[in-house]
Amino acid sequence: MEEKILAALEQVRPALQRDGGDVQFIGVDEHGVVSLKLLGACGGCPMSTMTLKNFIQTVLVEQVPGVTDVIQVF
């Protein structure tokens, strides 16, 4: 599952980098909850929750079977 998550993150990474940000994969638990850390401009952005849930989570849930949620760690 980790390899598929990393591959999906590579697809969203260019959009984040265009805005001066990035994403770091922290881990995935036995319930399919993926932990991510938003970096750069994305880490301190007031819209980071929307980016995480409406963009990154949508991509991961669609592309990686078993992913149920995405959370941000600081």
Image (spheres, rainbow, N blue to C red):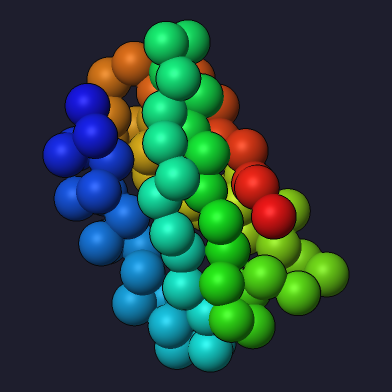
* Quadrant showing the C terminus: bottom right
Residue 8 against residue 44 in the figure, above or below: above
Q: State the residue lying farthest toward the right.
A: 46
- Residue occupying image coordinates x 67% and y 70%: 43
- In the rendered view, does 34 fall on the left or right side of 37? left
Q: Is residue 28 above or below residue 56?
A: above
- In this view of the protein, can residue 18 be seen by the observer? yes
On screen, residue 44 versus residue 67, left or right, reads: right
- Viewed as shown, does residue 65 lie left or right of 41? left
Pinpoint residue 11: horizontal percent, then vertical percent: 27, 61
**Whether residue 58 is visible:** no
Please determine whether, in this image, residue 41 is positioned above or below residue 70: below
Viewer-nearest residue: 53 or 30: 30
In the rendered image, residue 34, in percent from the top left (x then y), is placed at 47, 33
Image quarter in which the N terminus is found: top left
Q: How many marks?
A: 0
| Residue 18 spot, x, y in % from top left | 45, 88
Q: Is residue 40 above or below residue 71?
A: below
Which image quadrant for residue 4? Answer: top left
The residue located at (63%, 74%) in the rendering is 42
At horizontal 62% and vertical 59% (from top left) the residue drawn is 51
- Where's residue 25, x and y in %? 40, 50
